[in-house]
Amino acid sequence: MRYLSTRGHPWSSPAFPGPAFSDILLAGLAPDGGLYVPESYPLVSRAELDEWRALNYADLASAILAKFVDDIPPADLALLTRRTYTAQVYGNGRVAARAPEVAPLSWLIPPGRFGQEGGLALLELSNGPTLAFKDMAMQLLGHLFEYVLARRGEEINILAATSGDTGSSAEYAMRGKHRVRVFMLSPHERMSAFQRAQMYSLQDANIFNIAVRGVFDDAQDIVKAVANDLSFKARYKIGAVNSINWARVAAQVVYYFKAYLAATGEPSADAVQAVDFAVPSGNFGNVCAGHIARMMGLPIRRLVVATNENDVLDEFFRTGIYRPRPTGETCQTSSPSMDISKASNFERFVFDLVGRNPATIRQLWEAVDAGGSFDLSSSPCFERLPEFGFVSGRSTHADRLATIRQVYENYGLIIDPHTADGLKVACDLRTAETTMIVLETALPTKFEETISEALGCTPPRPPALRDLESLPQRVEVVDADPQVVKRFIERHVT
């Protein structure tokens, strides 16, 4: 398995076909500003799916990731996944009576009930250290970085942007790791109090929090600008943990397989049961992993893209127009981790949609990077969109409040606002014959104000996090300027 850039970066010689997995793990963005993708998607056979039904999450992760990892011995990869995916690390499940399990399904409507052949379930992805789905991939990245850097005798300075959950997930995964520093950008005063405290209260010497005056897209633009300064990137060994890093997306592919195998019985001889997945979407990384799983042959019928009021992705899947909004038009909502108007991973999907043509991607993203948009509505490639299984919908503040109330009244569960967005759109588009799995994105305690507005009460917190907001916080507030961030990095890298 070798990798290429969505924008067609030429490699140094015909003898070097492209970087290996460990190379792109450390690199983040490709040198031409594109995103790394595998030269082809590995296919999974029916027999492999049957064999994987007996595996626990750690061994399933090893089996799937081995298809993308060409330069880490399988035995070492298995040790890394087993060190990552344990009940102790992912033991914050909401059902106390149930033994801890990595990424369990929680059935709202089991298959066959109420006249519905297909069921409705939540895939619980938020039982990790920071109570957000980002932990599922980020904890593994921490171990991968430490392993690869030790083997190479190198170090890395991670520069990333967060709209809420990526930051704390990355920092908790990398804190105390040898040879790793983290410089995390976040939008100043645009996250929940819990999200800010989770990040800013960390006092580890290798963790640096930088609050940018602006929105998430401003912070993300800084990350890309620094990564595109190739001399600075090389001098200060800049890496990435946002979902622009292929390893993050690859790790997220695993839980689509896990959910499918848990939701379906043994396949019949003549058919494989398909499922739908609904995914709350902002930066497109989570649902991009579902796209990759589907391209690998996992029987996913539809991928439901659920947005909040920042509905750039919904607009594209309905109209073929991709129109990122400027900072002033990016809404501040009650599902803040989705307050994103430039979906970084969207480029990976469009690369497949346009037939993996890097010249087309360069042309399209030249317009996007200049603050513009593109329109594929009259392009032959847009007619192929149904082949990829994507549908979409939009949720508002009123919708998420109503969904939170309905789930609590009907099932006795409290869900967070982002999961509510996903569930609202899932229910709008659900069909009787197919099981719908909604990806949970965070535990509700991270968004107490919205839960209180919806239910008149606050959700319970894990004991270790009860006084989180009262802890001392360490953060530097800066203007949205790449040069300011570069100077900050220079001062703190010794």
Image (tube, rainbow, N blue to C red):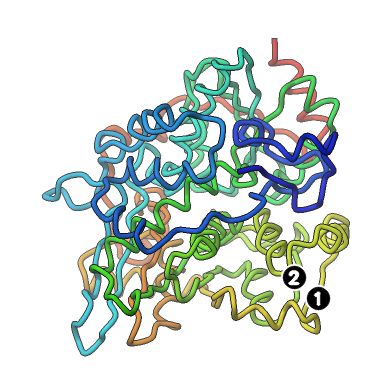
Name the residue tied to disc 2. 322
Q: How many labels does the image show?
A: 2
Looking at the rendered image, the quarter that the C terminus falls into is top right
Amino acid type at image mark 2: Tyr
Q: Which residue lies furthest to the bottom in this view?
A: 115
Residues packed near mark 2 inside 10 Å, few (<14), some (14 to 19) or many (20 plus): many
- Quarter holding residue 483: top right
Q: In this view, does 449 lie above or below 219?
A: below
Helix, strand or loop at label 2? It is strand
Q: Residue furthest top?
A: 494
Residue 468: x percent and y percent? Answer: 38, 34
What residue sits 64% from the left and 15% below the top? 154
Residues packed near mark 1 inside 10 Å, few (<14), some (14 to 19) or many (20 plus): some
Name the residue tied to disc 1. 375
Looking at the rendered image, the quarter that the N terminus falls into is top right
Amino acid type at image mark 1: Asp
Q: Is residue 336 left or right of residue 127?
A: right
Q: Which of 324 and 467 is in front in this view?
A: 324
Q: Which of 61 and 474 is in front in this view?
A: 61
Q: Are marks 2 and 1 in contact (CB under 8 Å)?
A: yes
Q: Which mark is first along the chain, 1 or 2?
A: 2
Residue 359: x percent and y percent? Answer: 86, 59
Residue 363: x percent and y percent? Answer: 88, 62
- Quarter holding residue 80: top left
Residue 73: x percent and y percent? Answer: 47, 29
- Marking on residue 284: none
Q: In this view, does 161 lie to the left or right of 119?
A: right
Helix, strand or loop at label 1? It is strand
Q: Nearer the viewer, residue 310 or 196?
A: 310
What residue sits 70% from the left and 36% below the top? 19
